[in-house]
Image: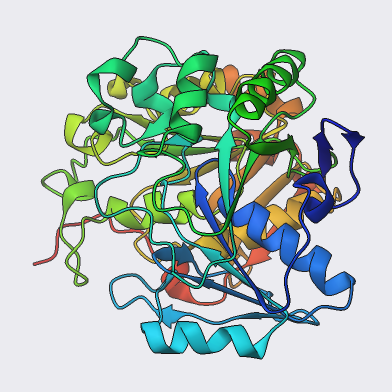
Amino acid sequence: MELQNLRGRQNSITDALQLTLPEHAVISVVGAGGKTSLVFAWARELAAAGKSVIITTTTHMFRPEGTEEEGIRVIAADDPEDPNKLTALPDDVLISLRDEADVVLIEADGSRRMPLKWPADHEPVIPDCTDITVCVAGLSGIGKAPSDVIYRADKLPESLRRDTVDLNLVHALVSSVNGGRKGVRGEFRVFMNQVDNDTDRLAAAYRLQQFFAVLGIQSAWGSLRDPGDVKLAVILEAAGDSKRFGSNKLLHIMENGRPMISSALDAARGVNAYKRILVTQYDEVAAMADGFTVIRNDRPDLGISRSMQLGIEAAGDADAYMFCVCDQPGLRTSTLERLIEAYKKGTAGIVSLAWQGKMCNPKIFSSRYRGELMSLSGDTGGRQIIAGHESDLLLVEAKSEDEVLDIDHSPE
């Protein structure tokens, strides 16, 4: 994790944001491009300093795994519509948390994992008891089309509409009283994330902090991603013709009342990925993919290899590719996170989910296999490559058969 402000490199988020935390501090984090990462990194920093921390939300957040660390508690309600998520507590319970910890960190906004955001009328949800509000902005959105990187870009006022996200637009998104400063309580700070040692983004951060300083807004910037982290591209393959199913199975409504593809989309949104890519031939599926780079597969007849290769091309300089099929309704964020953690250990260049020792989907391939993946044809997928590199394969056993179950045939 790298942190900077006008004074140079900083060793803590608290120092980078130039904050003195009050007793029983309540901090609400809004915006986009790393809210959850900031909340959990900050919690670990505070816990390491001997403070007790509670993490909660006033909207929705993905259910984390392994967060019952020393000094940190995650307290939120179960989301009745999505077992992968947590949701807001009743107001009286939320207020009572203040007395139970030295610091309460609140994820108070939603952004569908996009770098930037313009709030809707009902957003953000910042409690009155908030002492400090921090707006996060992801600088990876600069230079891209607003519709691709701004959550709720369709709600931008006419004066902010343009073809490409530039510094002036980022400044407006963050500093406007109708944008990042909407509903602010207490002190206000800005954290510019996703600088990632990119010289253009670093220059943008320096320039933006000057803009913010004119308004009296203190800011910091850097990367919440550990420099040793893998730049992982999650690639969802959703271009098949569903011939055995009899209709577009990705849109088939499951028992939970949601389309089948929702599970894969939600699972991918929940992981910390370098890029999220959806390859599809369907307009209806593309319309559901907020937060993804959507790539059109105009030749699905060429087989799954075509989707894999389109995804790899879109992944750019990613270190690894996770390929997910979209007909596994039992797929969860926790499933993908177990695969990612196994890959990060560096003992294997190919990691696959398995059930009872048998290889299943999803799979992760190191980018060193890019050439071989790009040479595939038809419906062979990655199994052909694995057959030639079995010593480089690691199987991660699924926790239940539901995680690996794929739906090929229409229910009777």
Q: Residue at x 54, y 82 (%)?
A: 75
Question: Is residue 170 rendered to the left or right of residue 210?
Answer: left
Q: Residue 233 appears at what percent x and percent y?
A: 59, 35
For the N terminus, give its image quadrant: top right
List the single residue furthest toward the top: 163
Q: Residue 303 appears at what percent x and percent y?
A: 37, 27
Q: Residue 279 appears at what percent x and percent y?
A: 38, 30
Count of numbered circles in the view: 0
Which of the 4 image quadrants contains residue 292? top left
Question: Is residue 281 rendered to the left or right of residue 107?
Answer: left
Question: Is residue 10 rendered to the left or right of residue 226?
Answer: right
For the C terminus, give its image quadrant: bottom left
Which of the 4 image quadrants contains residue 221? top right
**Which is nearer the eye, 210 or 290?**
210
Q: Residue at x 40, y 16 (%)?
A: 145
Q: Residue at x 43, y 55 (%)?
A: 109
In the image, residue 391 above or below residue 173: below
Answer whether residue 404 is visible to the viewer in this image.
no
**Which is nearer the eye, 157 or 69?**
157
Answer whether residue 32 is visible to the viewer in this image.
yes
**Which is nearer the eye, 326 or 145?**
145
Q: Residue 28 appears at what percent x and percent y?
A: 54, 61
Which of the 4 image quadrants contains residue 41? bottom right
In the image, residue 210 above or below residue 5: above
- The colour scheme of the drawn protein is rainbow
Q: Residue at x 11, y 45 (%)?
A: 247
